Amino acid sequence: MIPEIGHFALIITLAIAIVQAIFPILGVSLNKPQWVALARPTARAQFLFVSISFACLLYAFVTSDFSVKLVANNSHTQMPLIYKVSSLWGNHEGSLLLWSLILAGWGLAVSIFSRSIPPVMLARVMSVMGMVAIGFLLFLIVTSNPFERLPFPPVEGRTLNPLLQDFGLAVHPPMLYMGYVGFSVAFSFAIAAMLGGKLDAAWARWARPWTNIAWIFLTGGITLGSWWAYYELGWGGWWFWDPVENSSLLPWIAGTALVHSLAVTEKRAAFKSWTVLLAILAFSLSLLGTFLVRSGVLTSVHSFAADPERGLFILIFLGVVIGGSLTLYAARAPKLQSTGRFDLVSREVGLLVNNVTLAILTLTVLLGTLYPLIIDALGSGKISVGPPYFNNISIPLGTVLFLSMGVGLFLRWKKDSPERLMKKLLLPANLAIIIAIFAPMFFGKEFSWRVSLGLLLASWVALTALIWFAAQGRSLFVKPLSAWGAMLGHVGMAVAVTGITLTSMYSTEKDVRLELNSSYEVAGYAFKFIKMEDRKGENFTATRATVDISKEGKSFITLYPEKRNYGPGTMPMTEAGIDPGFFRDLFIALGEPLGKDAWSFRIYHKPFVRWIWLGGILIALGGLLAAFDGRYRRTRKVFLKEKANRQTSNKGAAA
Amino acid sequence: MKARQKRLIFVLLGVVAVIGASFLINKAMQGNFYKLYTPQEVLAGEVPTGQTIRIGGLVKEGSLKRSDTELEARFVVLDKHKNEVTIVTNKILPDLFKEGKSQIARGILKADGIFYAEEVLAKHDANYMPEEMKDIVTEQHTPVKDGVK
């Protein structure tokens, strides 16, 4: 009964979304205030009903109701509760329902925190969000019904892919979806602005915090994904340039450009049509990511099942969204005239360089990701694009980007003098060069220009951000939140780049064959294989190795890498033994038995690998602080005051 | 500076950006695409030696041999026409690597006809086969269903 309620609630959600998509926007053109006023209630009702639907499916998962096909295929009575919950989105149908829930959640949030937005604008925004919701709900109901029943329910479920039975998976997809779907808000604002033909500073001020928050979630989701891949996929990589990873990175890069170009639109009324284009691009890339992941055209850990019908549906949806919004853009963009004028040396140009570089990066990564599909479609063979392609692209583009990041902060809006700028930049430039030359010596390895370049850029970005930050605000201790945000965002990027540079260049990675009681030395650490044993976990059995690690003859930690077996029909899992540290990780993963008490092991020494994720956390934190800057709240207060004044004066006139 | 001069500078910057990007892509593409070949193509001599490529196929039953002293493993891959190529690797084989199952190896074909793999990938799910492998290992193409491929 409960699954049927869920299914029914989902259909009602679709009906509400249709009302939400049609009436408010039509009300604006036909001048019917009652229709315009539907924007808020429909958004809230949509959230209510999709929540009911989600709760019903969750109930089926928690109670292990195997008469529901999705539960039978993805859950198991012996799984811990947290994985029973997370297996809801560890599959195609459930993850789409989560997507719809999050979309409605963003709609609800906009309907609540929109008191300063004029009703006409809000009506348009809500209608566009309703249209996006229709697409996803139709997709769910028509091609991927999560509530499908089985005529003969099995006694036991087929369990969740063991790879996904992990805390990281419980949080990684919802985070990522919050980001993906969050860009639909920026997208809706952009479409609404084009429909209204007006895009002013107030518009940018409404759109900015929403974009920031979406971008934070995406940053967090990518960071989590990278961390999860590192410890759970078992082989210690933190980024593979896998097509699916790329499809989460693409909206992030576009989103980063958007966050910065919105600043120009807000402060200087420039880059207007470019900002709108970026908002369309960021959301389209989010949709493209969904298409690539869900359609099964790409081979990856993320593809659950290949189903051509579903792929076709998303492709059509993608075509409608991109085609429709670009057509609208072509018609309306000339109207969005940028009034702000600026000189060649100005912050606007700094941000322009940032945006152009990020746009080129987006396109080149996109090209590398789609190239195998294009080549295959043309019938010229099956290829895969190797990580060196992406590295060759990101190093030079990253260099331009990071150099401009340092300069950009110090630039003044509108017009700046090169002499003043030089004076400000002299100190950080010199310090960065010194660090780039001397820091690599500290590691005692041979000179590598990549390490020097990486450290030069990282210290340049970090130093400029810190020096700039010190001069902000009224005193040394009182700073506006937006300054905190910019500083943390830039420093976080520098921390991540330091981690990426040092991990990539100084890691030692060895696949070795170890017999019992023999040892192998990596970067001064001796890994000794002590024993092998079997153990039983909650819902798996495991073969566990005991490996003792010593440095200079002194044993300091014992790690237990293991192979887990989650029962018939599932794949074996490699659980690595990791000794995390601020400056280095030691990592050992168990391979296969090679006979004669010998096993294969993969041993890593990874300096500074934690910095990559620490950087991600700092960037997200920066975005969060910037989103809560006082001026966004002030806009609301001013608006409310004006409104109150208008109402009292109206009353006065009436009296 | 006059508005016209300024516009000219921006246009020039744009042109530089486009040229730079195409140069970059062109440079980055060289040698970083790994084409997928079948054992048949290897035997027919259609596969370039000495550059990184990929070979896909089924691991032949009973062909996996391990060294007694090193990590080295060697095995034979087959395609649907039973063409065979020997692969040697010094890396750990993935969890799902099994005789009789499909695999894709990335590495270099040397003049001795043996493929030296830097990485061996197995299909990553108990009932999932990489899309690009289907053509190589399936005996016959499955009939086209409902006009959808």
Image (cartoon, helix red, strand yellow):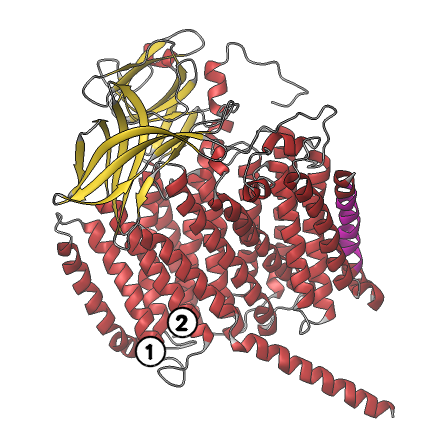
Coordinates of residue A235 in the picture (x, y in percent) = 34, 36
Does residue A17 appear in this view?
Answer: yes
How far is the residue under mark 2 from the one under mark 1? Answer: 19 Å
Q: Secondary structure at mark 2?
A: helix
Protein chain holding label 2: A
Which residue is found at the position 28% from the left and 35% from the top? Answer: A546
Looking at this view, is A139 or A325 the one in front?
A: A139
Q: What is the span of residues highlighted in magenta in the rendered image? A: A7-23
| In magenta segment, residue A608 | no
Q: Amino acid at mark 1?
A: Ala
The residue singled out by tag 1 in the image is: A470
Q: Is residue B34 above or below residue A478?
A: above
Which residue is found at the position 62% from the left and 65% from the top? Answer: A335
The residue singled out by tag 2 in the image is: A347
Q: Amino acid at mark 2?
A: Arg
Coordinates of residue A91 in the picture (x, y in percent) = 58, 36
Q: Secondary structure at mark 1?
A: helix
